[in-house]
Amino acid sequence: MTAGRATPRSGAERRLRLPEPLPVLIVACVILVVWQLVASLYFNASVAPQFRDGAISGADPKVPPEMRVVMMKLPLPSLVLSALVTPDNAPQLWLAGLITLRSAVIGFVVGGLIGFGLAVVMAQTRLIERSLLPYAIASQMVPVIALGPIVYSIFKDENVARILIAAYVTFFPVTVNTLKGLRSVDPSALALMTSLAASRLQVYLMLRVPAALPYVFQALKIAATASVIGAIVVELMGAQQGIGVTILRTQYYGPANASKLWGAIVVASLLGLVFFRVVAITERFALRWQPEFRA
Amino acid sequence: MRLRFFPDLALRLVAALILPVLVFASTATAQTADKVRLQIKWVPQAQFAGYFVAMDKGYYADENIDITIVPGGPDIIPEQQVTNGQADFGVDWVASFLAFRDKGLPIVDIAQIYQSSGLMLVSKKSAKISGAPDLKGRNVGVWYGGNEFEFLALMDKLHYDPDKDLNVIKQGFTMDPFLAGQMDAASAMTYNEYQIVLESGVNADDLNVIRYNDEGVGMLEDNLFATEDMVANKPDLVQRFVRASLKGWQAAIDDQAGAVDTVMKHVEPGSTTADHQGRMMSEVAKLIMPPGATADQLGVMDANRFAITADIAYKFHIINTPADPAKSYTNDFVGMH
Amino acid sequence: MSVNTIAAPLARPVRAPSARLAAWGPPLALLVILLGLWQVGAFHALFRLREFQLPYPLQIAQAIVDRWDVLWRDAILYTGPEAAAGLILGGLLGFGCAVLFASVPFLQRGALPIAASLNSIPIIAVSPIAVLWLGFGQQSKIAVVALMVFAPMVINAFKGLYSIEPQSLELMTSLAASPRDVFWKLRLPHALPYVFTALKVGTTLAMIGALVAEFFNAQHGLGITLSNNIQVAKMPIAWAAIVVAAMVGLALFGAVSFIERTVIPWHVSVRIRDGE
C-alpha cells in the first residue's frame, strides 16, 4: 500500500493529481457504464424481443406485467438520466431536491449541535455515560410514526416539530463518534497539561476538543448524509413538496414511473454526496494538521 | 374648459374616497376568513377530488374558509393529526376512525362521503382463485393498519384461520410484487390498484376479483371527521366546511373531466396520467353515489351501513365497546345543502 | 489525577462486586425513577399528552406479557437476526471498500463520496426494490439493513486506515516492513476504534432499518406488530413492540461494546476508567 504518505510527493505523483470534481465524475461515469451494461443484459434476458420497446415506453398494452416490473428492479441508466434532464420532469425533480436539501441542512445543524452537546455531557464521567447512553440508543429505535404524534403534541408548531424530528434522526452518530473522540486523548499529552497546571477548560479547549475533531468530522460526514434521510422522513409527514414526496408518489402509481423513481433516488444520493463533500472540504481546512492533509 | 374638468375631478374624488373603502372591506373580509386544514388520508388524487374541486372553484372561499389540504403518507395518522391540532378536519376509513374513538379520541364523523366499499382481492386467472374459498393455502397480500378487517370478516365467514389456512403477507402500497408474481392474490381498490393492474398489461378478462361488498363484509370507508370540541364550539364553521366540501363533490361527480383537470394540478407531475385519474374518478363516483342514490343523500351516514361496519369492528376487537351511533356520527351537517 | 491511571496495566482490572453495583446502581435507579414518573402521568401532564399518543408503562408491560411468545419469536427469529446479519454484511462490505479506497488514492477522492452518498437513500425507496429482488422474507430486510450500515462503516474505517501518522509509517519502512505488515500491524489496529464506532452507530441503524423495512411487504417481525397496531390505536401493543426492539438494540450495542473491549483493550478510550 502506497497511500497516505505525508512526505512530499514525487514529481510524477504531483502531476497526476486531478482537480477536485474530476475523480468523482470519472468514478460516476464508470459506474454508469457498468450499470448500463448490467441493466441491458438483465433487460434483454428478462424481456422477450417483441416486448422490449413496449416495456420501456409503457405504450404497448400487451407487454406482460412481469416484464414491466424489470424497469423498477434495475432500470437503464440512460432512461434514468433522461428523466433527470427532460423538461417535463427535470425542473420539478431538482426543485424538490433543493427543498429537501434546505430541510436537511437545518436538521444537520440542530442534530449536530444536540449530538455534540450530549457527547460532551456524557464524556464527563463514565457514570453519566452509562446513565444516558441507553436512552440515546433506545431513542433511535422509535420509528417516526410513533414519535410524530408525540412531538406534534408537545411542540404545537409544525416547523419546530419537523426540525426536531429531523434532528432526532441525525444526532446519534454525532454523539457516538464525538464521545469516542473525547475519550481518545493521548494520556501523555494529558499528563503534560496537568504538569503545566492547565485548568479543566484549557484541557478541553486545547487538548480534548482538537483530539476529538477527527472523530467529530467522521460523525459530521455521516450526519450530513443521514440528514437527507431525516428531511425525507419529515416530508413524508404531510409536506407538499420534496424528494421524499416525489419518491412516495411516483412509486405509488406503478412500474411505468420507474425511471422517475430512480431519478429521485439519484437526486437524493446526490444531495448526500454534495453535503458530504462540503463537510469533507471543511474538514480539510479545520484539520490541516491531520496526516492526510499535510502533504 | 371648467365643465370638462369637473366630471374628471369628481370622478377622481369619488374614486379616492371609495377605493380605500373597497380595499379595506375586501381585506377585512380576507382577514376574517377562517384558516382550515384538511388532512386527507393519502396523496392527492381523484379519491379526494371533491375537496380539490371545492378549493379550486372557490367554494371554500365563498364560505369564508381559507383551506389548506394536507397530503397524507405512510407515517401520517389522520386521527392523530386532527387531535393534536395539526389539522381541523380529517379523512379516514370508518373502522380506524372507530378504533381511535374507542381509545378515547374525541372525534366525530361529520359526513360519510363513501357509501360503498371499494376494497377487493384481485388475482390472475392463472392462479385459479375463482371464489373466496379458493384462497386457502395461497399467498395473499393484505393491507394492515386499519384496512384488514373486511379481510378478517371474510375469513371468519369462511371459517378460515388467517394464520394457518393462508399465507398472509403484509402488503405495501404498490402493486409491483403482485405484478411480478410474488403474490397469488393482492388487496386492491377498485379505483386505483385495480386500474394500475389493468394499465400494466393485464386484461380484465385475465383477472378474478373478490369484492368484499359482494361477500357481505364491506365496511364504510372515506369519511370526514372533526373533534367533538369543534362540533360543539364551532358548528357554523363545520357547517360551512361540510357544505363547501359536498358542493365540491357534487361538482366533481357531475363534471368528472373537469374534476380530473383540477386533480391533475395537484398531483406529482409525471407520476400519474389524466387517464388514470379519470378512471379513478369514475370508480370513486360509483362508490360515493351508488346506484339508486339521490343527490340529497350525499354525505349522509346510513344507520344500517354504520351498524354493519360497527358490528364487524366490535366482532374483531377493533373496538372494545360497541360503537354508539348517537355519539360516533352526526348527520346534522349534511343532507340539506 | 494520578500518574497510575496513565501507566495502568493493559489488562483490565477485575472489579469487586460492590464496585459493579456502584457502577450500575445509579443508572438503574434513574430508570426506575423515570418509569415511576411516567406511570403516574408526570410526562403526560407536563406535555399534555394523552393515552393514545403515549401509553403508560404498566399497560406496555401488560401487553408484553400477553404477547410475549409472539414478541420473543419475532425478536429472536426475525427482526433481531435481520438486524445482526445486515450489520455484519454491511460492515464487511463497508470495511472492504474502505480498504480498497485506502490503497488507491484516486478512489479515495472519486469513490468515497459516492459510497457515502448511499446513506442518503431512504428506506421507502430501497425496501420495495429489495422486495422485488429478494421476496418478502428476511433476505430483503437484511439487504436494506446492509445498505444502511455500509456508509457509516466506509466513512469511519477509511479514516482509520488512511490517517496514519507519518512517523509510524517511516518507522515501519525503516524496519523494512512489507506492505502487508504495514496493513496488519499498523493500519488495521489504528482503524479498529473507528470500525467499532461505526458498528455502534450501525446497531441502531440496523434495528430501525429492520423495523421499518417490515412495515411494507413482510410476513413476520416486530415491525409488523408495531405498524399494524399503531394505526388502529392499539398503543400498548405497538409500544410493546418498540420496547422489545429497543431491548434487542441495546443488547446488540452491548455485544459490540463487549467485543470492542476484548479486541482493543489497549485503546485509550477503553483503558482509561473515568473522566480525566
Image: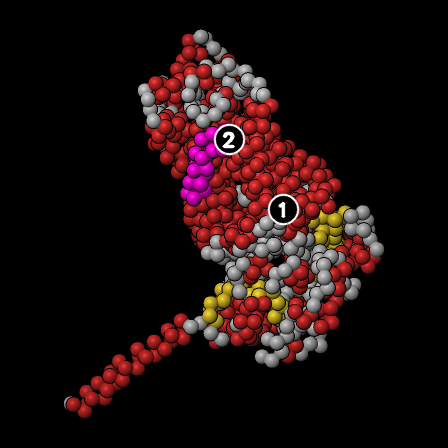
- Residue at the image point whose x is 43% and y is 44% from the top: A110
Secondary element type, mark 1: helix
* Residue at which label 1 appears: C57
Subunit that carries the residue with mark 1: C
Depth check, front residue: B224 or B251 = B224
Give coordinates of residue A114: x percent, y percent. Answer: 44, 41
Residue farthest to the front, as pictured: C18
Give coordinates of residue C162: x percent, y percent. Answer: 45, 23
Mark 1 belongs to which amino acid?
A: Pro
Please rate how many residues cluster around mark 2, counting C-alpha atoms within 10 Å: few if below 14, some from 14 to 19, many from 20.
Answer: some
Give coordinates of residue B138: x percent, y percent. Answer: 78, 49
Q: From this viewpoint, is residue C170 visible?
A: yes
Residue farthest to the top, as pictured: C175
Confirm or deny contact between disc 1 and disc 2 (CB under 8 A): no
* Residue at which label 2 appears: A127
Quadrant position of residue A26: top left
